[in-house]
Amino acid sequence: MKMNMLTKDLFHERMRSLQKDRTIKIIRVPIQTPTLWPHTETNCYLIGNDKESLLVDAGYDHQTTKKELERAILENSLAKPKSIILTHSHPDHALGVRQLIDWSPIVYCHNDEKQAIMAAISPVNELSILNDDDIIRIAGLDITVIHTPGHTAGHLSLYIASEEILIAGDNIVTDGTTWIGPPDGDMTDYVHTLNRLKQLKITKIGPGHGEWVLNPHEQIEFVLERRLYRESQIKSLLKEHKQLTSNRLTNLIYKNTIHPSIYEVAKRTTEAHLIKLMKEDHVSLKDSVYSLRS
Ligand SMILES: [Zn+2]
């Protein structure tokens, strides 16, 4: 009797180990990258099972990128990705492709991001194009491509409706807000993108930096409100001071609370707001000085 039980247990254990792991997994893999304060890591995402998988974003051009990704692939019993989707061209998201050349991946991006990515990831020079609303099927899972301009012109996000998950790239970061500034960023597009994303049924956001966001709608609203607040703050500062440079405006907005390493980024975010306000005919620019239109 005892022997029989043991044999049976061993048999089941053996069967379990022989069974392939076909469960679909969506794994966040934070990779050390030079990125903007307060973040030190950029997220890559592995999506798939032991038969088929894809990688979203590739981290930085550094050996640890490949090591970390291959460790996550092994730990989660995933197939090696044959496709890499780049959300955008920034070095902390795209350059890692260079480390992954021996995977022979097909690298995907949006057409509006193609040139910037080409320049960034050379010698990799073949890119496949994804368009808004394209569906990618991986390991039986449908992933919808969403063109989400704002942070950059050809920024992509991925929506997995069956799981209610959005892989948001740099549209959403866990701590605070993402930076939007010229020449890559466009505030008008960004506000439009956020308004579009908040219509989706989402229970979890995979951000470009930081932990999974488990209060997605709240976080999108927070970012939208922060942008609208900043815009009204700029308008009232211009009303009060009549004429301001973007430097002076940035100093008035942040009142020395800003980490020096991101001053330039803050200034460019201010400029992105000013460009939006000029497009809407609320603000005019003359000799680097901004003023409200009456
Ligand atoms: Zn970025």
Image (cartoon, rainbow, N blue to C red):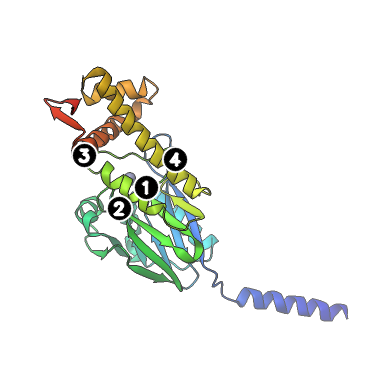
The amino acid type of the residue labelled 1 equals: Asn
On-image quarter of the N terminus:
bottom right
Q: Which mark is residue 155?
A: 2
**How many other residues sit within 10 Å of disc 2, few (<14), some (14-19) or many (≥20)?**
many
For disc 3, the marked residue is 280
What is the number of the mark on residue 286? Answer: none
Is 92 or 198 nearer to us in this picture? 198
Residue 234 drawn at (x, y percent): 29, 28
Relative to 164, say whether 237 is above or below.
above
Q: Position of residue 24 (x, y in %)?
A: 52, 67
- Near mark 3 (Cα within 10 A), the count class, few <14, some 14-19 or many ≥20, is few
CA distance for labels 3 and 2: 23 Å
What is the C-alpha distance between the residues marked 3 and 1? 23 Å
- Comes first in the chain, label 2 or label 4: 2
Q: Is mark 4 within 8 Å of ligand 1?
A: no
Q: Are marks 2 and 1 in contact (CB under 8 Å)?
A: yes
- State the CA–CA distance, disc 2 to disc 1: 9 Å
Relative to residue 132, is residue 289 drawn left or right?
left
The amino acid beneath tag 3 is Glu
Q: Nearer the viewer, mark 2 or mark 4?
A: 4
Q: Which residue is mark 4?
A: 222
Residue 236 visible in image = yes
Task: Evaluate whether residue 263 shows in this view.
Answer: no
Q: Nearer the viewer, mark 3 or mark 2?
A: 3
Which residue was labeled with disc 1?
A: 171
| Lateral position of residue 148 relative to residue 164, left or right | left
Percent position (x, y) of residue 128?
A: 26, 65
Mark 2 vs mark 4, CA separation in Å: 21 Å
Decide which of tag 4 and tag 1 comes sooner along the chain: 1
Q: Nearer the viewer, residue 187 or 262?
A: 187
Q: Specify the farthest residue to the left.
A: 287
Q: Amino acid at mark 2?
A: His
